[in-house]
Image (spheres, grey):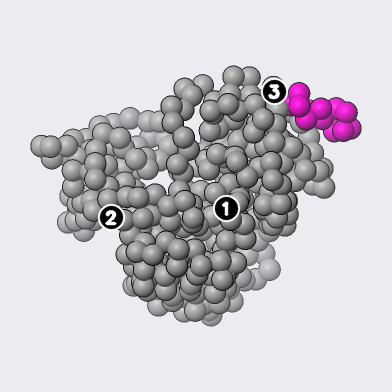
Amino acid sequence: MPSPRSGPDRCPGALQVHHAADGPLARVRLPGGVITSPQLQALAVAALEIGNAELELTSRGNVQLRAVTDPEEFARRIADVGLLPSTTHERVRNILASPLSGRIGGHADVRGLVGDLDRALCTDPALADLPGRTLFTLDDGRGDVSGLRGDFGVHALDDGRFALVLAGEDSGARLAEADVVSVLLAAARAFGESRGEAWRLNEVPGGTERVLARLSLARLGLEYGDPVTLPDAIERGPIGWLDQPDGNVTLAAGLAFGTLPARLAEFLAAVEKPIVITPWRSLLVPDLEEWAAEQVVRVLAPMGLIFDENSPYLQVSACAGQPGCAKSHTDVRADARAAIENEELPAEGRQHWSGCDRKCGRPRGEVTDVVSGHDGYRVENGSS
C-alpha cells in the first residue's frame, strides 16, 4: 500500500494552476476524453495567444497548457465553450472511459454514463473537496481503462451487468447500468468521509472494505459474484485506421511526447468531429467517412499526427524537461528528438527520458530509463 501523503494536494486545474519554471500550467479536465471541435479550437487559440503554442495530452485523457500568461483570461475562455461547467468541482472531474466504446468492440456503450456521472458529480457538494487525483473509470469490458487502477469504477461484463471496481480491483459487487452512477458517487462520498490525508482509496487502510460497509449494497438489493482479475494496464492504445461496424472509420493517432501543436489542433478542429483524447496521450478522430479519413491522413500526418504503429516516437516518452522544469538538467525532449532523428536511441523498445532522478511521467511496465545528470545521461533497465 502506498505511504500516506505528507502535504496538501496541489494537483493543477484550470483555476488552481501550477507555477512551473516556464510559467503557470493549467489543466483542463475532459470527462471521457471527449472534446468538441469548438472547444478544441478555443484551446488552440488560447495556446497560441496566451500559452506556449502547444497542448499537452495527459495520462488521464485531459489537456494542459504551459506558460499561460493570463490564467484568468484562460479560465474565461474555456468557460465560454463549456469546458468549465463547475468552478467548485473542476479538479475532481477525472473520468476515464474506454475510448472506442460504442463504436468498436466492448460489452457495453459507456458513453452515456460519462455524461451522467459528470453531471451528478458536479452537483454533489460533498464531493467538491475530493483530491484532484481521484480517478473514476468506466470500462466497457475490453479492459483498457480498468487496468489503470482507478479509485472508483465499473467494468462491463458479458452478462449485461457491471463489476464495481474499488481501488483498481473487482470488489465482487454487481450493478445494473441504472445503478452505476449513484453507487460510484456513494463510494466517493464514503472515501471522502474516511480518507484523512490520503489522496487515493488504496492509501486508506482497509479502504475498500470501509467503502463497501458504508454502501450496504446487500440492503440495496444488489448482487455479489466471484471477483474477477482485471487486466493489467496496456502499454499503448490503438494506432492507425480502424474500421467501425457502421461503415465509418476511426483514425487513431499518436503524437511525439504526447504534445499537440496548436496549429495542428486548429486543423483537427476543422474536421468538425469530436476528438477523443486517450489515456495513452494519443487521440481518436471517429465517425469519418472513408474519403474524409483519407484526407485527414494525407493532410495531418505531415503535420505531426502519427498513424504508423512502428514509429520510434511511439516508443519514447519524456518528462517536461527544460525550460518547463527547474529541476531538469537539460531540454530532455529536444535531446530525445535528436536521438530519434539521428537513429541514436540508447536502447530498443520502450524508453523514458528524464531530466532528473525523479523520473516524472514515467509510464507503467517494462521501460528503459534514460536519466540526465550533471555528467550527461545514464541508461537504466527496470519496470514499475
Q: Is residue 21 above or below residue 283?
A: above
Numbered label attached to residue 22: 2
Q: Nearer the viewer, mark 3 or mark 1?
A: 1
Residue positioned 49% across, 56% down in the render: 14
Residue 195 visible in image: yes
Q: Quadrant of the C terminus?
A: top left
Residue 49 position, x and y percent, is 36, 73
What segment is highlighted magenta in the picture?
Answer: 212-225
Kind of residue sitting beneath label 2: Asp
User: N-terminal of the two: label 3 or label 1?
Assistant: 1
User: N-terminal of the two: label 2 or label 3?
Assistant: 2
In the picture of the structure, the residue carrying the numbered disc 1 is 90
Give the residue furthest to the front. 72
Numbered label attached to residue 210: 3
Left or right of residue 232, residue 123 in this image: right
Distance from the alpha carbon under mark 1 to that under mark 2: 23 Å
Query: At numbered mark 3, what does the secondary structure look like: helix, strand or loop?
Result: helix
Residue positioned 56% across, 66% down in the render: 79
Query: At numbered mark 1, what does the secondary structure look like: helix, strand or loop?
Result: helix
Kind of residue sitting beneath label 1: Glu
Classify 10 Å Cα crowding around label 1: few (below 14), some (14-19), many (20 and above): many
Q: Is residue 365 above or below residue 320?
A: above
Q: Is residue 196 magenta?
A: no
**In front: 86, or 28?**
86
Residue 337 position, x and y percent, is 23, 56
**In front: 362, or 316?**
362
Distance from the alpha carbon under mark 3 to that under mark 1: 26 Å
Q: Is residue 303 above or below residue 335?
A: below
Residue positioned 24% across, 45% down in the render: 326
Kind of residue sitting beneath label 3: Arg
